[in-house]
Amino acid sequence: MNYYVLTLFPEMIENGMNTSIIGRAIAGGYLSLETVNIRDYSLTGNGRIDDYPYGGGAGMVMQAEPIFRAYEDLIRRIEKKPRVVYLTPQGRVFDQRMAEELAREEDLVFLCGHYEGVDERVLEEIVTDHVSIGDYVLTGGELPAMVMMDSISRMVPGVLSNQESGQYESFQDGLLEYPQYSRPEDWRGKQVPPVLLSGHHGNVDRWRRDQSLFRTLKNRPELLAHAELDKKDRRYLQSLLDEEGSSGLTAEEKKFLAKLLAF
Ligand code: 6GU
């Protein structure tokens, strides 16, 4: 996977991406990263790339031409026309499925905006995908671009070691991850759940599955509604409903569960 990032803050992207697992994958040649400083393509050569918004209003708008020149220079150099992702809270919300889809591309360009926005005309001209990373406001597209590249990179062959391989992590099967424990067995009086020390793999697997179901019900019930539940999953969830008081579920969670199990 080759990433190209059009940004006003290339050092932010380079610093973030050349660290940890993604940094190792770049060093190992499984990923490549090229940042392009939009400021280098300023119209007048004075480094100015923004101006006041037509129609008035707060803040500044990034001008079309420097971005377009940065983009054109890039595609001329690489002799390819990859998909161009524009990071914006107005975009489609990024999720695991989108990460998997984008991971199949050979090249991706990310356009990071700043200030109050980017002149719409250059977006119409070069952007193929408008993407948001969630319903909150950020100061620029750099962190969202790095979030996307991190998540996409995990799916690129060779990026994760076998140890790190993400097949069983959160969302992979539509449920949240179960809790993990390591040494010591007793940490400040808190014990590791005994089933994990039992050596009974069947019981461990069942306990972990139940924990995943419980967490998903508590924190992301809408995921549970779409997850594939087998007989044993349903039996566990039913046991939560049947328990008197001690299940740790609110009345609302019980109501949701009762509806789910009725199907
Ligand atoms: Cl993709 N960009 C910005 N600037 N803010 C965001 C976002 C993206 N996603 C959520 N908030």
Image (spheres, helix red, strand yellow):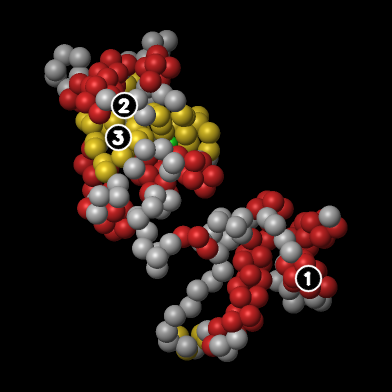
Residue underneath mark 3: 5
Task: Locate the N terminus by quadrant.
Answer: top left
Residue 90: where, in percent of width, then height?
50, 29
Task: Locate the C terminus by quadrant.
Answer: bottom right
Q: Earlier in the sequence, mark 1 or mark 3?
A: 3
* Quarter-of-image position of residue 195: bottom right
Whole-number angstrom distance, CA of label 3 to CA of label 2: 15 Å
- Image position of 90 with respect to 243: above or below: above
Q: Amino acid at mark 1?
A: Arg
Disc 2 element: loop
The residue positioned 52% from the left and 63% from the top of the image is 168
The residue positioned 66% from the left and 71% from the top of the image is 210
Disc 3 element: strand
Would you call the spot at circle 3 few (<14 residues within 10 Å), some (14-19), or many (20 or more)?
Answer: many
Labels 3, 2: front one: 2
- Image position of 147 with respect to 158: above or below: above
Determine if residue 255 is in view: no
Residue underneath mark 2: 80
Please state if 79 lies on the left or on the right of 151 as rendered. left
Q: Amino acid at mark 2?
A: Lys
Would you call the spot at circle 2 few (<14 residues within 10 Å), some (14-19), or many (20 or more)?
Answer: few
Q: Quadrant of ligand 1?
A: top left
